[in-house]
Amino acid sequence: MERAGASRLPPELNAVVELIDQYRLGWSLDQAFYNDPAIFELERRLWFPRQWSVIAHASEVDEKGRYIIRHLYGEEIVVVRFGDAADDIAAYYNVCTHRGSRLCTKDGKGRLLVCPYHAWSFKLTGELQSKQEVPEGIDPANLGLHKVATRIVGGLVLCGLDPDVLPDAQPLADAIEGGLRQQGIDRSRILVRKSYPTKANWKLVLENFSECYHCRPAHPEYFRTNGYVKVVAMRDEAAAVEWQRELDSWHSVIGDAEFKKGAWEAGGLDKVQYGMYRKPIGSGRKTLSDDGEPVSRLMGGRSEYDGGETGFRLGRLSMISSANDYATLFQMIPRSVNETDVYLTWLVDKDVDVDINPDPITWMWDVTTIQDKKITEDNADGIRSRAYRPGPYTDLEAQPAFFCQAYLGEMRELITGEKSPAPVWQFPSKGYSSQPTCAVPVS
Amino acid sequence: MERAGASRLPPELNAVVELIDQYRLGWSLDQAFYNDPAIFELERRLWFPRQWSVIAHASEVDEKGRYIIRHLYGEEIVVVRFGDAADDIAAYYNVCTHRGSRLCTKDGKGRLLVCPYHAWSFKLTGELQSKQEVPEGIDPANLGLHKVATRIVGGLVLCGLDPDVLPDAQPLADAIEGGLRQQGIDRSRILVRKSYPTKANWKLVLENFSECYHCRPAHPEYFRTNGYVKVVAMRDEAAAVEWQRELDSWHSVIGDAEFKKGAWEAGGLDKVQYGMYRKPIGSGRKTLSDDGEPVSRLMGGRSEYDGGETGFRLGRLSMISSANDYATLFQMIPRSVNETDVYLTWLVDKDVDVDINPDPITWMWDVTTIQDKKITEDNADGIRSRAYRPGPYTDLEAQPAFFCQAYLGEMRELITGEKSPAPVWQFPSKGYSSQPTCAVPVS
Amino acid sequence: MERAGASRLPPELNAVVELIDQYRLGWSLDQAFYNDPAIFELERRLWFPRQWSVIAHASEVDEKGRYIIRHLYGEEIVVVRFGDAADDIAAYYNVCTHRGSRLCTKDGKGRLLVCPYHAWSFKLTGELQSKQEVPEGIDPANLGLHKVATRIVGGLVLCGLDPDVLPDAQPLADAIEGGLRQQGIDRSRILVRKSYPTKANWKLVLENFSECYHCRPAHPEYFRTNGYVKVVAMRDEAAAVEWQRELDSWHSVIGDAEFKKGAWEAGGLDKVQYGMYRKPIGSGRKTLSDDGEPVSRLMGGRSEYDGGETGFRLGRLSMISSANDYATLFQMIPRSVNETDVYLTWLVDKDVDVDINPDPITWMWDVTTIQDKKITEDNADGIRSRAYRPGPYTDLEAQPAFFCQAYLGEMRELITGEKSPAPVWQFPSKGYSSQPTCAVPVS
């Protein structure tokens, strides 16, 4: 890469660019990218504002005037329904334009958003309502709420911090909105929401989520429930052949023509990241439950179980695992250089009985995410050591390896202003799938 | 302003000066002044040591040898009575000159101050007593305790960290000592002391305390108890006229010739800040209680209730609200860039029965300060957002607006060494008072 | 000292060298050395990796395959027995070479060390066992565990973080291994281990531990139990004469020919620090117990009590106090600039009954260390004040004074690369001993 641009950078940024340029393709990142608060601060300024993330389900703001408080990349956001149309949802930074106070202090509903400090009020569409409070000579039109970019896709509210630099979300909507509707995500309601605050850099949380090489040692429940893990968690040619047979047989019955093809971790600052896949759970299991038997009501207008799981990826840090009768939304929200808030939200059909027992539904992803929190925190602890050196990703870790390259290229471009080449690195194929948990395209 | 001096500063100081020079008069401060630890560190080094603050009431050290530990701008201070005269009170940094240990670990009484580490002892006047411990060739006279500047005014102990740069406290004493005595502050005792640790920069705590625009939305109890709030918390010409009538009627009976006139936020590094005002509570209320009826014994030799409240300001961060039968002392002590310790101390006449019920006395300022803590912390939270921009102060926020200008001028002078012009900014008068809670002079 | 080297340093390092060069011999350190995170970071990078410390007793890994997790200078270490010979103990950074995860999450025993994340396994001697996991083209020989330097001396496991820069431990072994065996340390077992996390810089913990001037005011139990304290804690010529008589009389009966002479705080980066001394407890006491009577079984093959205490120093931050029937190991482990983990481990003969009452054994050092934690934290609190100035060490504080000089010389050498002269400072002799608690050589 050319260093002309970088050479004019301040020394601390030049040091980061040098670290990037020393990166060894196919190995884990240098310690600084996981531990250095200055690099997190760079991400906060440059990288996070360009990311689309799922922040809510539309059913959470089901009436005009209903608003909820959510968090995104360290920012508090108010998501508010301002009209009756499906897309009439806006989001604002939760900051009053008068003296900077938090505007909403809890979820609620109202005709206006009223600051509890000095009672400045704002329309649901963000404009300052109480214009009579503004001193003479100041234009109240400049004192509207600061907007967060929003996009409603298949019942999900996606947000991004900086409307000026976010990539166009249309390709994501084109690719996966149909799939989300087919899975009934748009006609679902929230059953349970649970947080798993994880003391680890967000990239470790993401890397862990995007490979299943660790599933055999670390996730016994997940391992026995999911047929495909025999392929992605171990190198076993016989198992791979057997799984391919199960896949073929399932596809011959089900077909996947219903799904558009999704891009897989294309990389690049100007492209929204997304993905979608379908596969059978395996071994005749109908859903992702302990015994494979139904745990809720069929979703998406389905009349019978087909034993499939559909995965979605929306941006870099939101995923969905959707079985026939429930779906699980994963949100990863960086809090500090070594803290990441992980939220799981279980969705069921909106007509599911309110008294339904949630435990069989939440079982698999709850036990698995508790385990993921532990192994990711142990990973972070080890990386803090002076003995840590980048280690080699194996061919079962293709996706985190690819992510590292894409991430570094994007950071380099953001710091230097020089266009980075698209990530190219690929593991040698060995005849068995390196398909990760989520986010691999149907092809 | 000239930049000759600033241009020779190190880059990080130059950046602060640039922020100051970009300040827009009448708007709230840039985010950095509320959030940046480096600016707090500058304040800690340059600005705090020049501030006089009330640190104790003289009755807390009522006998020779009695000492108490107090905190001031992150420093632990020992306040000690060294003689029997009213002014025989000194204060020292709580640091032994031998190895630097804390000298006193709890309040107490003694002939000497003895360090618990190696038993070095000091006279109540600060000199090293155990001279025999000092190695040969070292002058024990150089090993006395480090003094904190002290000044006793109307029964209150004022301290300041750096005797070399503190402004002369005499103008403050000249202006308000009479008023303090008239209110009986000098012949009072402490009834209750309570802390309200607030997660917000000290300037937000101070700004909140010095305007009452927020009193209507945020303080229902305070709003209904205090007549003047109808004027300072809302723009209502009719209410202003009515309040002026009540003021005139009260002054015609009471008079305020007894009070010296106080300066109001004059600004400037070389001047001690102080203020004093008197006003009726209003609506026939005798004192600042829930129903307006007496809650304690009359103070200051008064023989009957006149329904007035007297306010005092001592330095930038200490205030007193004094009703006829009790007084409330407010201390704001910065702890870190986003933490401020707020202490309230309720004073009653020294002869009040020890079994008196404190709840009716503490009621108003306790409920109000609990509310202030919440709104100030919400203010701080909002200002941390990347969406925060300085907002315009309204004409009901004249005092925080003036403070911002004075503060920035002083910081600029401390950083650059260039004399700053006196603050000039004024809201246009609109015929109703912009008199804030405290610290406005009687005129 | 020459400044040629220093002048080419970055400004922040130059500032540290300037602070070192301004040091006043015989006075406590500048505030920055106790409080500045940047100096702690320098120590962490440059100074700690060169220090040998006791990290475990060999009995804790008594069988092949047994491993324990320990902490050292912020690093997590796995100590493992890889063979049956006495010295077959190794230590590794607890970091997997694959993705950097913590390798062991609790103490255990096994044929291999297996990472719980992706099941990479390592031989007890550190080599990667699961070589089939390594991507093509990468040599598995480069993926063995990162070794920590180890040395077994008299049953104690010493470790140091950086084998490349650690001084040779042989002189320590030559000097004190015989003494450790004579005291039965090698044939002991752990009775109790207790932590005393102390909110103070590690140098304050060490300084406090290496002088007994504070023992009279701060340690009443220790003071009445230990005869020598009358000399090292106060300047009393009569007591000194009396103690010398007790010493002479004890030596005439016991002799100390059995002990090699140890060096005392020689200073210098290329020398391992160690020390050893013997002295009577005094006043006919048999052991370090409340009443001086035995509390456990005689150690080291001794057939009767001789009333002596033997002290050992192993590196800068590990000490042992060994009475006839129990020994106490002290470990000081810096955690951050103002946090030090202090561990005490009480050792008794390996054949002591498992039901023995530990309280009389742990009594003295437990009460004393609880007191030390308090006074050291008060010392740290005082030093944080803006009023702190370095103070003069007295002649009863010879050892911390000497340490300060040695430490600064070593830090200067590490920063500048210029050889520092050996520390020279000495207190004038006054006829009585300035022998500190530990680490003074028998001479």
Image: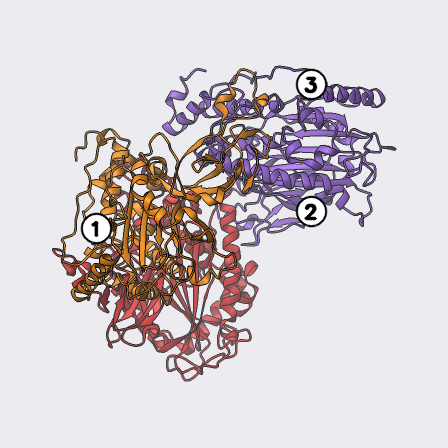
Chain colours: A red, B orange, C purple
Q: Secondary structure at mark 1?
A: loop
Q: Quadrant of the N terminus of chain C?
A: top left
Q: Quadrant of the C terminus of chain C?
A: top right
Q: Nearer the viewer, residue A309 or B430?
A: B430
Residue shown at 34% from the left, 56% from the top: B376
Q: Nearer the viewer, mark 1 or mark 2?
A: 1
Asked whether the residues under the numbered discs 2 and 3 touch, taking CB atoms below 8 Å apart as contact, a structural biologist would say no
The residue tagged 1 is B27
Q: Which mark is residue C88?
A: none
Can you tell which quarter of the image residue C406 is in?
Answer: top right
Q: CA distance from mark 2 to mark 3?
A: 49 Å
| Residue C316 locus on image (x, y percent) | 61, 30
Whether callout 1 and callout 2 share a subunit is answered no
Position of B247 with respect to C274 (left or right) is: left
Q: CA distance from mark 1 to mark 2?
A: 67 Å
Badge 1 amino acid: Trp
The residue tagged 3 is C432
The residue tagged 2 is C66
